[in-house]
Amino acid sequence: GAVVSQHPSWVICKSGTSVKIECRSLDFQATTMFWYRQFPKQSLMLMATSNEGSKATYEQGVEKDKFLINHASLTLSTLTVTSAHPEDSSFYICSASRPGGLMNTEAFFGQGTRLTVV
Amino acid sequence: DAKTTQPNSMESNEEEPVHLPCNHSTISGTDYIHWYRQLPSQGPEYVIHGLTSNVNNRMASLAIAEDRKSSTLILHRATLRDAAVYYCILGRQTGANNLFFGTGTRLTVIP
């Protein structure tokens, strides 16, 4: 079964509003989670690294004030798209990996959240 | 980050083996080779990974060239459920999974 869960699976919002997406690790604690964005027919693009108890690390070109990340607990990271615009419409995906295992073990991905801004 | 090169698309007949190639000529000595796949409208899922030796698991096999500059993901019997985009990714950092996805190979399985 799924070990990383996202909510909601899809959301439609009006332009100018904010949307929060949750990413939960279900059966392990994740000090680090990752957020990706995927536009239609394109590959996944890493947006940021979410660190429990500290600030997120953003990839170049990703606006930290627009994509707010909060990793307040070891099982939950949230991504808030603030003042959303139609160009923010995309498939947002999070991932996490089990701590304490072998190096470079698998990453578990959420099922994704499809955001449509109208 | 070291890049990987994959064909944009491949086709396979159902129940036949599939060999998905990946070139990674700039791979470093500590890079692991990871394969993930993404079914339509879903998040990626792990397939297999390796460092130097060939690897087998219940999903697939990974054949790694001796010089590590290329690898091949082998699906032994393609099923319709294997139709997906397959990504070959080099993992630079141990213990972390900030994966940088390339364009991947879209596998179509023909019934």
Image (cartoon, coloured by chain):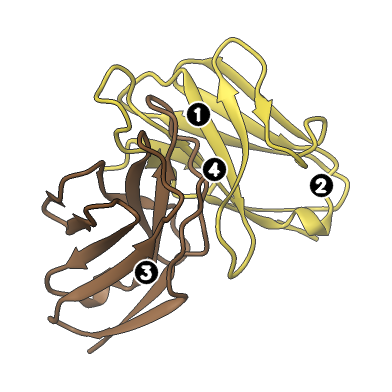
Chain colours: A yellow, B brown
Q: Residue furthest front?
A: B67
Which chain is home to disc 3? B
Query: Dots 2 and 3: beta carbons under 8 Å?
Result: no
Q: Where, quadrant-wise, is the C terminus of chain B in this rendering?
A: bottom left
Task: Describe residue A101's horizontal placement relative to residue A18 as left or right.
Answer: left
Quadrant location of residue B23? bottom left
The residue to which callout 3 is attached is B84
- For label 4, the crowd category at 10 Å Cα-Cα, with few meaning under 14, some 14 to 19 and many 20 or more, is few
Q: Report, in whole angstroms, how far the alpha carbon at label 3 lies from the one at label 4.
A: 25 Å
Q: Report, in whole angstroms, how far the alpha carbon at label 2 lies from the one at label 4.
A: 31 Å
Residue A33: numbered disc: 1
Which chain is home to disc 1? A
Image: B11 above or below B46:
below
Q: Secondary structure at mark 4?
A: loop
Image: A19 above or below B4:
above
Residue A84: numbered disc: 2
Query: Dots 2 and 1: beta carbons under 8 Å?
Result: no
Q: Residue A39: x and y, percent?
A: 64, 61
In depth, the one of A104 and A28 nearer the eye is A104
Q: Label 4 sits on what residue type?
A: Asp
Sequence order check, earlier mark of 2 and 1: 1
Nearest to viewer (mark 1 / mark 4): 4
Q: Label 3 sits on what residue type?
A: Ala
Query: Dots 3 and 4: beta carbons under 8 Å?
Result: no
Task: Describe residue B78's horizontal placement relative to residue A66 as left or right.
Answer: left
Q: Secondary structure at mark 1?
A: strand
Q: Label 2 sits on what residue type?
A: Ala
